[in-house]
Image (cartoon, rainbow, N blue to C red):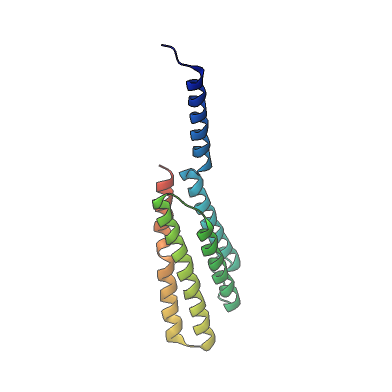
Amino acid sequence: MHFPKRYFLLLALAVAISGLTTSCTESKISQCNKIIQVANKAVSEAKTVTNGGQTSDPKTMIQAADAMDKASKEMEAIEVKDQKLQDYRAGFINMYRDTSKATRDFVGAFEKKDRPAAEAALTNLQQATTPEKQLVDDLNSYCSK
């Protein structure tokens, strides 16, 4: 069977174009790593600012809330094509926002010496951080497949 040269040229061109298309889209692992990197950075910053959760100084707690706001913005900036990763990213964004808001509410109530509001904010803060372990476990499981 005899193929003209132009078919070999077209085949080579098609392979090159498909290779470029594949290399231009990020892999699932690359997208996972970006999400994990931001999540790890957020935890590290919060622990550093609050001395591992041992500080109850209102200014320090506001810095932790600022770190959560920053993490939510960094997480939003990650482009994710995979639907499951989009869901995990959204989970982290919501958790960071809720944590920041609850922290700020707690500090506000603490400064006003409003015990019921402080207790409610503390409950909200605990609820805001509850999804973290499940999110991390699910993301790690999905990304390791």
Q: Nearer the viewer, residue 92 or 141?
A: 92
Q: How many labels does the image show?
A: 0
Q: Which residue is farthest top?
A: 1
Q: Where is residue 46 in the image (x, y as percent from the top left)?
A: 56, 65
Q: Position of residue 88 (x, y in %)?
A: 42, 56
Residue 8 is left or right of residue 87, and the answer is: right
Residue 76 is left or right of residue 123, and the answer is: right
Q: Where is residue 136 in the image (x, y as percent from the top left)?
A: 44, 55
Residue drawn at (51%, 18%) of the image: 5
Residue drawn at (40%, 42%) of the image: 145
Residue 1 occupies which quadrant of the picture?
A: top left
Q: Which of 83 and 100 is in front in this view?
A: 83
Residue 83 vs 123, above or below: the answer is above
Residue drawn at (48%, 66%) of the image: 96
Q: Position of residue 140 (x, y in %)?
A: 43, 49
Residue drawn at (53%, 42%) of the image: 24
Residue 104 vs 95, above or below: the answer is below
Q: Which of 51 and 83 is in front in this view?
A: 83
Residue 139 is left or right of residue 39, and the answer is: left
